[in-house]
Amino acid sequence: MNSKQLSETSKFLSYVLRHEPQAIGLQLDSEGWADLDALIAGAATDGRVLDRALIEAVVAGNDKKRFAFSEDGLRIRAVQGHSTRTVELQHVEKTPPVLLYHGTATRFLESIMQQGLIAGSRHHVHLSDDETTAVSVGQRYGKPVVLHIEAARMQQAGFRFFQADNGVWLTEAVPVGFIRQ
Ligand code: HQG
């Protein structure tokens, strides 16, 4: 399998495991798990030839550790980033570091400084504990800018923080008063 095949499969898995499982008739449970055989069979109806070896290579090689297998190896899920309403991952609630970072594009700043950070179509606002990751997240949408989020102060004010299995920090929304440019 080549890198093109791996990245195309990764995009396809993101699509069906986070956003549109129904596109291939796949069922996800509330924790986001899909049966691996059902995924392979559903993909086939879409003309995609997947097998366990290819999926394992994508899971193991994924730069952001987006996907995980169940312990018995029979199921697979995306660890964060869902928009489909059938999934409601019970992420582990954790105490965040003093500061977390959010990468965005300069063109969104005006709106963000009015409304705060909102989750949009995803279930959470995504934050990272390093600025480098935030820059690369932001540049997907234009000229990147990194916002400093006063996470510890937010938590003291009653906002909850979660960490996904791949290290991404999640919270429901960030009010303007906790955002520093
Ligand atoms: C922006 C990728 C205007 C927000 C990454 C962002 C991440 C606002 C965009 C993960 C706003 C949403 C998530 C407001 C937020 N007004 N714009 N009030 N509040 N925004 O893609 O954080 O590759 O849903 O700044 O690595 O960019 O998918 O979120 O620019 O971890 O695994 O609205 O996606 O991971 O965009 O990225 P997204 P994100 P994966």
Image (cartoon, rainbow, N blue to C red):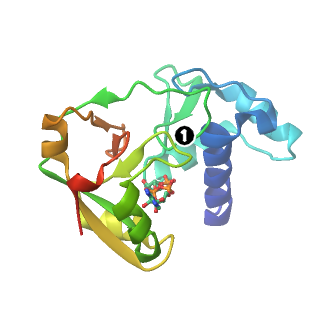
Which residue appears at 64% of the width and 25% of the height? 28
User: Is residue 1 in view?
Assistant: no
| Residue 92, position as x, y percentages in the image | 31, 28
Q: Would you place residue 72 above or below residue 132 in this image?
A: above
| Residue 18, position as x, y percentages in the image | 60, 40
| Residue 170, position as x, y percentages in the image | 35, 42
Which residue appears at 66% of the width and 65% of the height? 4
Q: How many marks overall?
A: 1
Type of residue at label 1?
His
Q: Residue at label 1?
A: 82
Quarter holding residue 24: top right
Please identify the quadrant where the N terminus is shown. Answer: bottom right
Which residue appears at 32% of the width and 48% of the height? 174
User: Is residue 163 in view?
Assistant: yes
Residue 176 or residue 88, whichever sits in front: 176
| Residue 138, position as x, y percentages in the image | 41, 68
Q: Would you place residue 119 above or below residue 32 in this image?
A: below
Horizontally, residue 124 falls left or right of residue 167, namely: right
Decide if ligand 1 comes within 8 Å of the CB at mark 1. no
Q: Residues within 10 Å of mark 1 (few under 14, many from 20)?
A: many
Please identify the quadrant where the C terminus is shown. Answer: bottom left
Residue 69 or residue 77, whichever sits in front: 77
Horizontally, residue 106 falls left or right of residue 32, namely: left
- Which residue sits furthest front? 114
Which residue appears at 16% of the width and 36% of the height? 157
Residue 94 or residue 71, whichever sits in front: 94
Q: Secondary structure at mark 1?
A: loop
